[in-house]
Image (tube, rainbow, N blue to C red):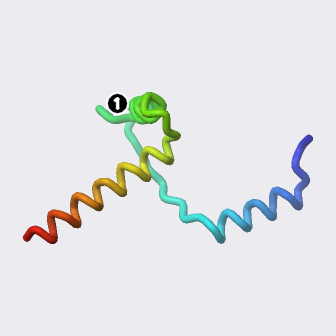
Amino acid sequence: MAQSKAHMEATTRYNKKAYDRIELKLRKDAEINGDVLRTHAEAMGESVNAFLLRAALETMQRDNAKIKEE
C-alpha cells in the first residue's frame, strides 16, 4: 500500500526535526569510494550509516584521549 501524500509530508517534517543530515562526497576513482565503503560496512554487518557513526565516534575518542595526554 502506497503512502498518502499527508503521511509522506508528516514523515518529512519529522525527519527534518529529528535528524541532522551531513552529505559525504566520495570520488568514484578514489581509493575509498562508495563501493569500497558499502562493501566494508556490509562485511562488518553494519549499514553505511552505522559504520560512519562508529568511525566518527572512535576517531573522536582517540582524538580526545590524545588531547588529554598532552
Number of labelled discs? 1
Amino acid type, mark 1: Asp
What crowding class fits label 1: few (fewer than 14 Cα within 10 Å), some (14-19), or many (20 or more)? few
Q: Quadrant of the C terminus?
A: bottom left
Residue name at image x 80 percent, y 64 percent = 10
Could you say where residue 21 lies in the image, as x and y percent from the top left?
A: 54, 60
* Point 48% across, 58% down: residue: 22
Reply above or below: 69 against 62: below
What residue would you read off at disc 1?
29
Horizontal and vertical percent position of residue 32? 33, 35
Horizontal arrangement in the rendering, residue 7 relative to residue 52 (left or right): right
| Residue 63 point in image, percent of width and height | 22, 62
- Front position in the image: 46 or 22: 46
Is 68 on the left-hand or right-hand side of 4? left
**Foreground residue, 48 or 54?**
54
Rendered image quadrant of residue 43: top left
